[in-house]
């Protein structure tokens, strides 16, 4: 029993000690919240940490923005700007107004958001938030992009805004995100141009196809289908080489032209192997070169590593993603590269008329190879002279000067006086000088380009007035001179060589009187009365025929009588 009592005593003692300890702690206020004074609880401004009014307005606007109450948020932010223009929150409030329009969405709201962001950049161009505003402007057009087969206006504007952001704010932390968005935008624009080029390729319009595809190759170097674009360019030149057989040229000219087009096609295939060796169509380029009997180039290790890095950065396209793209209006950007530098400038665009003109020059070169070599640009997949090439060598595209310009090389780049031999229909030859500003008759001008006779007022200068060829007809007005012709700068006057006057027009014979041949019971109907026509009296157009009482019945005439009633006709 003593042992049981000892246990009970210990347990009770421990409970008592614990109760005393907890009571002391509660009395010390550890487990109780300290109550604030009544004055501080009811009046928030009495607190030491109370916010200023501008801060309260800004916080309330941000809460409304996060809850989707965009009108209330804009009202609070505008109140802050109007009431406290010198507040430290004024700059952030102006940027937040643009955010309210941006998050609200819709075409009208996006337009208003762009204006707000542009105003912010104008007022605070050196602030770090200006890069954010420019990024938001580009995102506005990025969100409104459509699929490649639609209008590319929004994609083009997004490309311009992202490029402006990267170039104007190179130190911003948003540069990596802007570059990735730019790669995606250029992927959409590349798909748009590629679809047009492929369409022209199927219609065998090789000039238009080459122009579109070459623009993709020059502008978007990390486009996901650039290897296919190069293959199509090479195929277009190969097709042109096959079409040479249909031209009316001699065998030597055809051979030269086929060789030229074959080299261009091989150059396009070479670029696929050398610059994009890890892309899917690199093997197709090798097969085409082997079929043409051309050597197959070997890419460098650096080109292999760079191409492999770009291809590995592209996200795979699975069946689920394809199904989602079919039912959405947004374009697919999953094939855009995640590495590599996007193009920040547009090179001169290749135009289809330039390709056609160059093809005509190629035909002329094939006929006369000694006169002028086939024009080409080293390192390009075609021989089109772009704006940059012409700017580097402007004399290559200018025609050689003749006459005085060839004698004075210093004046080759200016407009100079050039003399050209002219011959007219009257077998009179002469020279006319033209300097681009006026035209006058030179010393070898025709003999009829002299001053008119004295006393005649023609209103023209002596150099441009024509005189009669026959001295016996030197009197009268200039219009009465038989040989008077207007001055056309020495050129022959256009007109018929036979100046014999036409015979006088004869008066046509009078038309016979019109007679209606339809008759009824031997009596002519609507016959023109010759007597009335001779006397000039007007006769009714449709005279009423005489009433036959024996054959007709009318309400205004007497009824038929007797046996005439039985005759229905």
Image: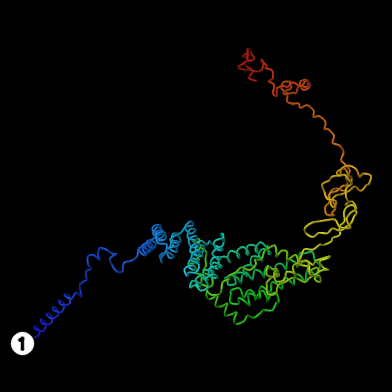
Residue 495, horizontal then vertical, whole percent: 84, 48
Q: Quadrant of residue 232?
A: bottom right
**Does residue 323 appear anywhere in the picture?**
no
Label 1: state its secondary structure. helix
Number of numbered tags placed on the structure image: 1
Tell me which colouring the rendered structure shows: rainbow
Q: Among all residues in the image, which is located at the extreme bottom? A: 3
Q: Among all residues in the image, which is located at the extreme right? A: 472
Task: Judge left or right: residue 510 versus residue 78.
Answer: right
347, above or below 563, in the image:
below
Question: Could you tell me which residue is drawn at 90 percent across and 54 percent down?
Answer: 428
Of residues 512 and 164, the one drawn nearer to the viewer in this rendering: 164
Residue 321, horizontal then vertical, whole percent: 49, 67
Residue 152, horizontal then vertical, whole percent: 57, 61
Q: Quadrant of residue 502?
A: top right
Question: Could you tell me which residue is drawn at 68 percent across and 72 percent down?
Answer: 381
Q: Which residue is mark 1?
A: 2
**Does residue 409 appear anywhere in the picture?**
yes
Q: Quadrant of residue 360?
A: bottom right
Crowdedness of circle 1 by 10 Å Cα count: few (<14), some, many (20+)?
Answer: few
Q: Among all residues in the image, which is located at the extreme left? A: 1
Task: Judge left or right: residue 458 versus residue 91.
Answer: right
Of residues 3 and 154, the one drawn nearer to the viewer in this rendering: 154
Q: Quadrant of the C terminus?
A: top right
Of residues 434 and 81, the one drawn nearer to the viewer in this rendering: 81
Of residues 249 and 92, the one drawn nearer to the viewer in this rendering: 92
Q: Quadrant of the N terminus?
A: bottom left
Task: Judge left or right: residue 357 versus residue 91.
Answer: right
Task: Judge left or right: residue 234 versus residue 98.
Answer: right
């Amino acid at each position: 029993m003593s042992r049981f009592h000892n246990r009970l005593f210990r347990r009770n003692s421990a409970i008592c000690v614990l109760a005393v300890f907890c009571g002391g702690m509660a009395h010390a206020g550890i487990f109780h919240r300290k109550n604030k004074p009544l004055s501080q609880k009811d009046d928030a401004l009495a607190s030491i940490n109370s916010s200023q009014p501008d801060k309260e307005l800004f916080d309330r606007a941000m809460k409304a923005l996060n809850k989707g109450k965009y009108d209330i948020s804009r009202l609070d932010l505008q109140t802050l700007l109007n009431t406290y223009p010198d507040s430290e929150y004024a700059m952030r409030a102006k940027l937040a107004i643009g955010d309210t329009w941006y998050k609200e969405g819709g075409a009208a709201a996006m337009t208003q958001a762009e204006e707000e962001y542009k105003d912010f950049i104008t007022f605070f161009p050196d602030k770090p938030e200006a890069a954010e505003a420019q990024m938001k402007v580009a995102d506005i057009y990025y969100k409104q992009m459509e699929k490649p087969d639609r209008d590319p206006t929004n994609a083009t504007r997004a490309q311009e805004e992202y490029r402006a952001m990267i170039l104007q704010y190179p130190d911003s932390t948003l540069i990596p995100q802007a570059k990735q968005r730019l790669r995606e935008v250029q992927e959409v624009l590349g798909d748009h141009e590629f679809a047009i080029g492929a369409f022209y390729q199927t219609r065998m319009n090789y000039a238009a196809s080459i122009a579109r595809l070459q623009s993709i190759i020059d502008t978007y170097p990390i486009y996901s289908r650039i290897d296919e674009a190069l293959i199509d360019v090479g195929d277009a030149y190969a097709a042109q080489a096959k079409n040479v057989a249909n031209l009316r040229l001699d065998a030597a000219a055809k051979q030269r032209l086929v060789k030229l087009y074959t080299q261009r096609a091989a150059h396009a295939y070479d670029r696929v192997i050398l610059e994009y060796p890890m892309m899917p169509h690199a093997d197709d380029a090798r097969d085409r070169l082997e079929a043409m009997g051309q050597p197959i180039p070997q890419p460098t290790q650096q080109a292999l590593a760079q191409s492999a890095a770009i291809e590995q950065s592209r996200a795979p396209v699975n069946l689920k993603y394809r199904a989602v793209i079919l039912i959405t209006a947004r374009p697919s950007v999953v094939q855009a590269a995640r590495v590599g530098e996007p193009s920040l400038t547009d090179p001169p665009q290749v135009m289809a008329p330039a390709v056609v003109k160059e093809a005509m020059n190629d035909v002329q070169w094939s006929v006369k190879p000694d006169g002028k070599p086939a024009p080409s640009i080293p390192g390009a997949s075609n021989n089109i002279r772009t704006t940059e090439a012409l700017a580097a060598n402007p004399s290559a595209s200018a025609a050689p000067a003749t006459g005085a310009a060839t004698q004075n090389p210093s004046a080759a780049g200016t407009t100079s006086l050039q003399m050209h031999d002219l011959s007219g229909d009257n077998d009179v030859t002469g020279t006319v000088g033209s300097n681009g500003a006026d035209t006058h008759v030179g010393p070898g001008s025709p003999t009829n380009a002299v001053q008119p006779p004295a006393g005649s007022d023609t209103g023209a200068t002596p150099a441009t007035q024509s005189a009669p060829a026959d001295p016996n007809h030197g009197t009268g007005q200039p219009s009465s001179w038989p040989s008077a012709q207007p001055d056309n700068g020495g050129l022959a006057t256009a007109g018929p060589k036979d100046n014999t006057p036409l015979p006088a027009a004869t008066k046509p014979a009078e038309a016979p009187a019109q007679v209606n041949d339809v008759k009824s019971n031997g009596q002519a109907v609507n016959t023109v009365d010759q007597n009335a026509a001779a006397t000039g009296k007007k006769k009714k157009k449709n005279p009423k025929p005489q009433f036959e009482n024996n054959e007709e019945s009318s309400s205004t005439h007497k009824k038929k009588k007797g046996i005439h009633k039985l005759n229905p006709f």
